[in-house]
Amino acid sequence: MQILPHGRHARSSRRTTFSILILMLVFMLTLFLNVLPAKASISSPGNQALNWAEHYAAGCWYDYGGTSCAQGYDCSGLVSQAFLHGAGIWIGRDTFTQLATNGEGHFHQIPLDEARRGDILFYGTGHEEIDTSWYHMTFGAQEPGTRVGWHEWSGWWQPTEAFEVW
C-alpha cells in the first residue's frame, strides 16, 4: 500500500511538477520549431518580410513579372514586395538587379549554413525565396501553375547563396 501526500504539501508538489512540465514543453517546442534563432529577432527586416509574405501572399498564384496577389507573383516580385511592405526596405525588383546592386546596398552575404528565418536564398537558376525556421524549407513563388507557399529543398533543388538583409 502506497501512502499519498495530502493537504498543502500535495498541492505544492503538484504545482511544482506542473511548472516543470510546462517549462520542459516550452523548451522542447523552441528546440523543435527553432522559432527564433539567436541571430534572428522579431523586429529583424527578414522576419518582418517573411511575416508579411506568409500573411498576404500565401496561396496567391505564380505569374512571371507579377508583384501582387491580384496579378500573381514571380519569385523576385514576391521577395521585393515582402521586404518593401513588411520591412520598408527596397531591395530592387528582379533577381539579377538585386544581385548586381547588392540589394540596393542592403544585402550582407552569409554562408548558406548560417541562413536563418527571413534571409534570402538564391538558387543558381536565378530563382530566390525567403528562408523559414524549418529545416531546408523556404517560402516563395516557385513556377507557373503553382501557388505561393512553402517549399522543401531536395537533392536537385537547393539554394547556392544566402543573404541577410539589413
Image: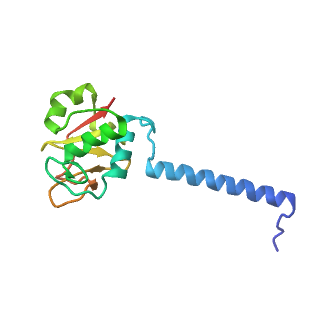
Expressed as whole percent of the image width and height from the top left, the position of residue 89 reads: 31, 32
Screen quadrant of the C terminus:
top left
Q: 140 or 5: which is nearer to us?
A: 140
Q: Nearer the viewer, residue 116 or 1?
A: 116
Name the one closer to the observer, 12 or 66: 66
Q: Is residue 74 found left or right of 19 in the rendered image?
A: left
**One can see residue 128 in this view:** no
Q: Which residue is farthest bottom? A: 1
Name the residue rendered at 15%, 33% in the picture: 97
Give the residue at x 24% y 46%: 78
Residue 41 image-quadrant placement: top left
Which residue appears farthest toward the right when viewing the image?
7
Q: What colouring does the structure picture have?
A: rainbow
Whether residue 7 can be seen here: yes
Which quadrant of the view contains residue 128? top left
- Furthest-front residue in view? 70
Q: Relative to residue 9, is residue 52 depicted above or below? A: above
Q: What percent of the width, then of the height, locates residue 31?
A: 48, 48
Q: Which residue is drawn at the image coordinates 22% and 54% (left, top)?
A: 154
Residue 146 coordinates in the image, percent (x, y): 20, 60
Rendered image quadrant of residue 3: bottom right
| Number of marks | 0
Residue 158 in the image, given as x and y percentages of width and height: 21, 48
Image-based side of 92 in relation to 39, left or right: left
Image quarter of the N terminus: bottom right
In this view of the protein, which residue sits in the foreground, 144 or 157?
144
